[in-house]
Image (cartoon, rainbow, N blue to C red):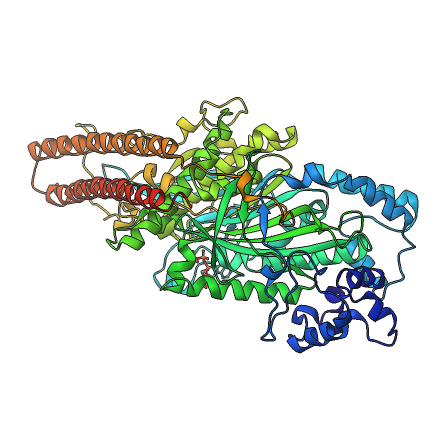
Amino acid sequence: MNRSDNYIESNFNNKWLQSAGLHSFYSSNPNLPPLQDFGFYAGGEGDGSRLNRSLQRGNSGSTDGMTPSGFTKYGGGEQMSPSEFSPGLLDLHSFDTELLTEVHSENNLNLLNQPSYGEGLDEVNAYSLTSKFANFSCGENNAVKSSLADKEKASNVAKIKVVVRKRPLNKKELAKREKDIISIDPYSGSLTVYESKVKVDLTEYVEKHGFVFDAVMNEDVTNDEIYSQTVEPIIPIIFQRTKATCFAYGQTGSGKTYTMQPLPLRASQDIFRLMHHHYRNQGYQLHVSFFEIYGGKVFDLLNDRNKLCMREDGKQQVCIVGLQEYNVTNVQTIKELIERGNATRSTGTTGANEESSRSHAILQLAVKRLVDGNESKPPRLVGKLSFIDLAGSERGADTTDNDKQTRMEGAEINKSLLALKECIRALDNDQGHIPFRGSKLTEVLRDSFVGNSRTVMISCISPNSGSCEHTLNTLRYADRVKSLSKGSNSRKDLSSSTLNLRNSIQLPITSSTSSSSILTRSDDVRNERLPYATNRFGWPKQTDRESSVSSTMERVPVARPLPTTYSAPPVENYKSDNGGTDEEIMEDDFEDSMEETFEPKNISRLEKPVTQMTPIAEATDDLALLLEEEEDLVSAHRKQVEETMDIVREEMNLLVEVDQPGNQLDEYITKLNIILSQKAAGIQKLQTQLRNFQKHLEDYNVLSSASGGN
Ligand SMILES: Nc1ncnc2c1ncn2[C@@H]1O[C@H](COP(=O)(O)OP(=O)(O)OP(=O)(O)O)[C@@H](O)[C@H]1O
């Protein structure tokens, strides 16, 4: 057992004992072992019988006053149903800042009044554990300094942080001799994608795409470093009434799970450390909930996958009615809860993998605090940290399965990711109306983007050439999210964001393909920015995102001498991952899963009558607009491809006219035919995707209206 994780300082125990009705009993038996030795929640030893023992000891007291959101043990068979204690109304948006008393001043007071730090068992250890978060120590001045330091830290943590992580080439990719097409400069935060392309005249070239993010992580970066760069800086400000969200986005197999899995445990470890040392005796508690959005519905992963309702109250605050929260006291318990939730999730549908990629799972760590130290009242939310495991968008986009259930899943994924993108666009354009209601996902994400919130997006990318299209889509999506911070953040952030790049630099293929990796150059991509139109923040406008197809296709002049030899371009060079031949218009809209965070609100306001709430309206208008936009994109794409096909046909006719023995025209024409057929296939694919999307939308709307929008 990690003592520091489970250690509960004695005064805190007393409070807890009072709330649990055990205090008098415990006081009259001073020889009883310390509370933490009972292994609540099976922490450390996972022995549920310990809980029973503690409950039996406290039998003289009522259990009614136990932790408001339920008191549960794990790992031991029996379990007190949390619902026995809490109907679990989770208010997603309101409570904290509005309802809390001045936490800062209370903190200061408590820090000033509390005895010198160091009476606990972990004195030395505690200092070293917490010193990285705040320069606290005993004494008034230091306490005030500590609080100020916290505030300063809070204002210094970027509102939206976008981090990119590249995974190493895997065995399969190495066996196929795939190239690593990503180069990263961690010092400047820049990343370059080298995309192999072939012109209509069959000239091979490398298109270079440069990006700059808050941080870019190479394949050799550890999960610990990821944690330090992403979540760790947020932990202290969770105690300052901040709602934070961390989500991973990326194509299947890019490392989302690998990256996300360790984060909640690391975070809770640090939260406990702060709670037990820096904020000791101040009545803080950590509550955990875990739920998923599947097919547009919300399910509680810690309560038998109970279906939950999302409601909006008169103040447009979203609540998840019935969501179960658990008051936890150690990391081990959280680990067990996560395992339990994951098991529930994977058994919820037929295929475990499919399941996990078809639902958005949200794990929340809520820091709460007793009101005026009164343990008979529900604690109030102080801050919240949400971890979102987004569904893979590519699955949604590529759905060709006729199975209705599968299509419904795909429809919901598409809908939620499109809605998310719409919200991002709206925020980016400073639109008055942000269509958060476009999906359950965005409803829940809403408070991650507005108010006192922090968002960390970890974009996971695969390094192999075969994933180039998906990688570019992920990076473009990340770029859109990053741009959100332009309007709301400091100038510091603004200036760094303007470094971002959207240029495509064409390089001759000869130098770049000769080595096993094309990442041999050290170009400073920042010097190669193209003069795109920018929005008021100095960022490229939405309309500039997609460079036109024809601009990268040079028509072969009639007089141009034909090459005497043709190096056959690998088919991969033409093909995008989704079978299309060219641009990313569609994928950019369908692709890449986003994680969102829910910031469920005050679970403790159990009495709030449901009748005060009104059902959330389905945003059919928003969806219709989205669909229209997708249709426009497909039409624009089709037009561009058709123009290109015309050029190719014309070239072929000209070539036939000048056909001479030795010119290898047959081979050239064959290659042009391949291009033509690939472009035709690309159009077909896009049309199929659009049809699927329309069908999914219809199915979804039918289902939604049948189920009353829940
Ligand atoms: N940074 C990394 N270092 C080493 N291995 C990694 C890294 N990232 C991912 N992997 C490995 O790559 C494989 C795929 O990763 P992971 O399952 O996390 O992808 P994913 O994006 O969650 O996929 P899906 O969307 O299908 O769930 C795993 O075997 C994982 O161990």
Q: Is residue 645 visible?
A: yes
User: Horizontal and vertical percent for residue 157?
Assistant: 67, 40
Residue 267, picture quadrant: bottom right
Residue at the image point whose x is 67% and y is 46% from the top: 383
User: Horizontal and vertical percent for residue 52?
Assistant: 68, 75
Q: Locate residue 402 relative to residue 177 in the image: left or right.
A: left
Residue at the image point whose x is 54% and y is 66% from the top: 339
Residue at the image point whose x is 61% and y is 61% from the top: 84
Q: Locate residue 410 relative to residue 615 in the image: left or right.
A: left
User: Horizontal and vertical percent for residue 329?
Assistant: 70, 62
Q: Locate residue 570 relative to residue 51 in the image: left or right.
A: left
Q: Is residue 516 visible?
A: no
Q: Locate residue 384 relative to residue 105 in the image: left or right.
A: left
Q: Nearer the viewer, residue 232 or 694?
A: 694
Q: Is residue 222 above or below residue 140?
A: below
Residue 140, picture quadrant: top right
Q: Nearer the viewer, residue 33 or 593?
A: 33
Q: Is residue 255 above or below residue 670?
A: below
